[in-house]
Amino acid sequence: MSLLDEEGNQDESLESKTLSAEDQVKDHSTGTRVVAGQIFLESGKSDSQSENEENFHSQEQEKENSLEELNSLEMSNLLNKDLEEAEVQTPVLTAIGGTADGEPCHFPFLFLEKEYAECTADGREDGRLWCATTYDYKKDQKWGFCESEEQSNKRRQMQEAEDVYQIGMKILNESSKKAQKKVAYQYLLKAADMNHTKAMEKVSYALLFGDYLKQNIQSSKELFEKLTEEGSPKGQMALGFLYASGLGVNSSQAKALVYYTFGALGGNLIAHMILGYRYWAGIGVLQSCESALTHYRLVANHVASDISLTGGTVVQRIRLADEVENPGMASGMLEEDLIQYYQFLAEKGDVQAQVGLGQLHLHGGRGVEQNHQRAFEYFNQAANAGNSHAMAFLGKMYSEGSDVVPQSNETALQYFKKAADMGNPVGQSGLGMAYLYGRGVPVNYELALKYFQKAAEQGWVDGQLQLGSMYYNGIGVKKDYKQALKYFNLASQGGHILAFYNLAQMHATGTGVMRSCHTAVELFKNVCERGRWSERLMTAYNSYKDGDSNSAVVQYLLLAEQGYEVAQSNAAFILDQKEASIVGENETYPRALLHWNRAASQGYTVARIKLGDYHFYGFGTDVDYETAFIHYRLASEQQHSAQAMFNLGYMHEKGLGIKQDIHLAKRFYDMAAEASPDAQVPVFLALCKLGVIYSLQYIREINIREVFSHIDMDQLLGPEWDLYLMTIIALLLGTIIAYRQRQHQAIPRPAGLRPAVPQQEPPPEHQPPQ
């Protein structure tokens, strides 16, 4: 499946999931249940209600209760009214033309000994829908069309477009070759030209990012505007992005906010995520932690519900600045040669290589694509050799089921038991899951608890997560929120998404901890950034690596809008290097400054130093040494950056943005040398320079003649000091003369070598001065 298609699935309207998501947003603190390590909330009172009960007086509470009663009465009256209107306004199809023009269609009706509960095109070559106006068509021959000729033509066109779209999607999903995907997009282009909404969405994003189609911002904008008119949440979100980033249109944060809001109301998850970040950071809106919490929690509920037992995909966060300085080191990507070496070892029977490659292919990441077939093969080889880790992962694959491995609780249980008997924590955790949910065995909470404890003791995150869930929900043990918090924290240190999700729910509701909106938002944000759309970080990196900076910068800009700090710094880096031609020359530095600023506010040290540099040199803004000094000081104090300390030393030395102070300059230089070994050489040179400057200042401040007039050389060096001085000078001259004579002596050549042809002397005017 292509990334665009997977994003499409993630972006689907929340019609089927909105209610459950909103119910979870209410944050009930009691009556919870656990599914796959998640806290699901069923009953109880909301945050705002619980706060009101604690803070408001009883009189105000009575008023609130009476208002609630009135509201509930109004709601019930409205619902009854809507139901009555719905009954009255049941649409009745009227036959058009035929033998019963104007008469109501009769459903069901009998035609060719088959009953029809709706209009049909059976019996007609033109495919136009018709109905009978009496039950038995053969007997009464009463019929009429269900649609006008214009409606019929439009419907047939849409059906043709749908067929073309499905052909394109089939090729797109079944092929991994770039050439085939390009063919698929030709079909999607054809369907888009026929006004097929989903095809237009696919094509517009492909044109925006340059995925399998030539990048064309203007064409994508026109399609997004068309989609927005039709009420497409994807189109609304994308148009908001164009206005936010100023691509193809004049930048307008107000318009961006409107389109993002409409997209979010339509159920677009990326629009919700963008709004969550905007309310959290106060971008274009008043900063509101509670509003950010609402949006982020909605998306986090969706992401958490998609997490399987085998875990989510690995998110590769590659910083372009680090990658340019140290290629391959910062990215954590495996070189092709190294992968082939591991494959060679695996083929030779190296069990560790087999297990490692199996895990890489199971989860994907580090330059290896997710491939369950290869993962299964490697795990099988290692399991046959008796490796408990491989057995446990096979159990996981059978427990989950996929296109490659059929779901089988019995087979999963066998592998989990074998691994658990060998003391493997992954097997113990899998066995605990089997007993917790009754997969292949009767439900037994005591045994589930026992196996989860064994796995947790060995530091396995799944065991810690499930143990926390059991304590939270009181399953097999007495409810203990402190214990739940402890195990969720341990699992979060191992990077488990559901651990972050559960901790966020606890901080959002104040369950077992003091309620903290800020902590809850940060945790929910972390969960949201693990969604399927995070895969675009890798596609953007690949685009940049392939030399397509325009495509890379647009992808990073969209991810930056979603709040990804690494995308903000990467977008700023590409703009800083002036590698993106789609951004005007005059706009490059101001836009880079904006994204460095957003990345710095999320704690990225290099971005904070870059902000100082931009204000120091006047890139994208006016030269402002005081602001530059503030940014350097923040980077020095908060992140202990050696670069920032060195810059502060320089500014103190020169008196830029601060009063000149050589002593403070030396102090900051010394701090920089202590903070990083790489800073020691430049610090040494800076201190040498500082010493010279200090000496010159000292000499300026004193009278040289006065100093020499007070010096008595006879008393200092003895009465014959002039003889000593002359002897030293003579020795120095002799040494220099001897050295120069040795230099002018011809160097003897080895026997047998021909003498070099003397070079022709250059004209006198071009000879270098002696």
Image (cartoon, rainbow, N blue to C red):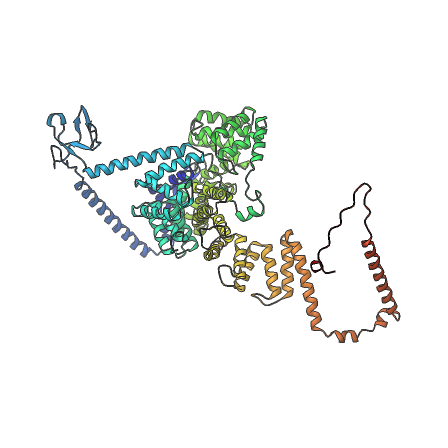
For residue 659, side relative to residue 179 (left or right)? right
For residue 205, side relative to residue 686 (left or right)? left
| Frontmost residue, 37 versus 304 | 304
Q: Is residue 51 above or below residue 170?
A: below
| Quadrant of residue 695 within the rendered picture | bottom right
The answer to whether residue 696 of the structure is visible from this angle is yes
x, y percent for residue 494: 52, 41
**Residue depicted at 62% across the width and 56% down the height:** 672
How many circles with numbers are drawn on the protein? Answer: 0
For residue 374, side relative to residue 244 (left or right)? right
For residue 753, side relative to residue 206 (left or right)? right
The answer to whether residue 43 of the structure is visible from this angle is no
| Frontmost residue, 174 versus 660 | 174
| Frontmost residue, 655 versus 187 | 187
| Frontmost residue, 462 versus 703 | 703
Q: Is residue 291 above or below residue 19?
A: below
x, y percent for residue 630: 53, 61
Q: Is residue 230 above or below residue 35?
A: below
The quadrant the C terminus occupies is bottom right
Q: Is residue 542 above or below residue 675?
A: above
**Residue depicted at 52% across the width and 54% down the height:** 607
**Residue depicted at 30% across the width and 36% down the height:** 161
The quadrant the N terminus occupies is top left
x, y percent for residue 256: 37, 53
